[in-house]
Image (tube, rainbow, N blue to C red):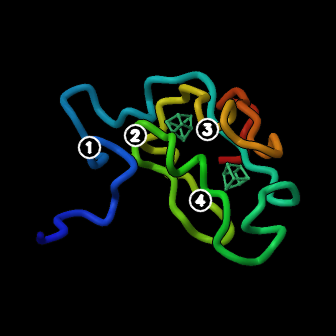
Amino acid sequence: MIKQDENISGICTPAIGEAGKTGDWSDVKPAIDHSKCTPAVKGKAACFLCWLYCPEGVVHMTIPVQIDLDYCKGCGICAEECPPNAITMVRKEDMNE
Ligand code: SF4
Ligand code: SF4
């Protein structure tokens, strides 16, 4: 079987739609505290439950973990699923963007 897409976590690949980028829809965004995030703490690929559960496929399995906020809809699933509570949902105007 030919693997078509490296991203198996989401049902779609982020793209600009008729309503613009999905990241524009929300008032809140996830902020990662890398001092609590397992891959950053251990210095190796581990956990990545945020990547697994994100319905938008915008979490990157990198060390440290990165989130494409242009397409993050702010649902908060990643924050709910993060075992060490490394993700906090914060208001966009309170983020350093
Ligand atoms: S779920 Fe939490 S601890 Fe695990 S990789 Fe994501 S941010 Fe880090
Ligand atoms: S808030 Fe939702 S869309 Fe954004 S990274 Fe987390 S799970 Fe994905």
Q: Earlier in the sequence, mark 1 or mark 3?
A: 1
Q: Tell whether circle 2 marks a residue whose Cβ is less than 8 angstroms from ligand 2.
A: yes
Q: State the residue at coordinates (71%, 42%).
A: 82
Residue 97 numbered tag: none
Q: Nearer the viewer, mark 1 or mark 4?
A: 1
Q: Secondary structure at mark 4?
A: strand
Q: Residue furthest front?
A: 1
Q: Measure the C-alpha gap from mark 3 to mark 4.
A: 12 Å
Residue 12 numbered tag: 1
**Image height check: is 80 above or below 70?**
above
Q: Which residue position holds label 4?
A: 66
In the rendered structure, the answer to whether residue 8 lies left or right of residue 27 reads left
Residue 42 falls in which quadrant of the image? Answer: bottom right
Q: Earlier in the sequence, mark 1 or mark 4?
A: 1
Q: Inspect the image, locate mark 4, and give the three-letter code of the amino acid beneath it.
A: Gln
Q: Inspect the image, locate mark 1, and give the three-letter code of the amino acid beneath it.
A: Cys
Q: Earlier in the sequence, mark 3 or mark 4?
A: 4
Residue 89 falls in which quadrant of the image? Answer: top right
Q: Secondary structure at mark 2?
A: loop
Q: Inspect the image, locate mark 3, and give the three-letter code of the amino acid beneath it.
A: Cys
Q: Inspect the image, locate mark 2, and give the three-letter code of the amino acid beneath it.
A: Glu
Residue 56 numbered tag: 2
Quadrant in which the N terminus appears = bottom left
Residue 78 numbered tag: 3
Cβ atoms at labels 1 and 2 below 8 Å apart: yes
Q: State the residue at coordinates (40%, 47%).
A: 57
Q: Measure the C-alpha gap from mark 1 to mark 3.
A: 17 Å
Q: Secondary structure at mark 3?
A: helix
Q: Secondary structure at mark 1?
A: loop
Q: Measure the C-alpha gap from mark 2 to mark 4.
A: 14 Å
Q: Earlier in the sequence, mark 2 or mark 4?
A: 2
In the rendered structure, the answer to whether residue 17 lies left or right of residue 21 reads left
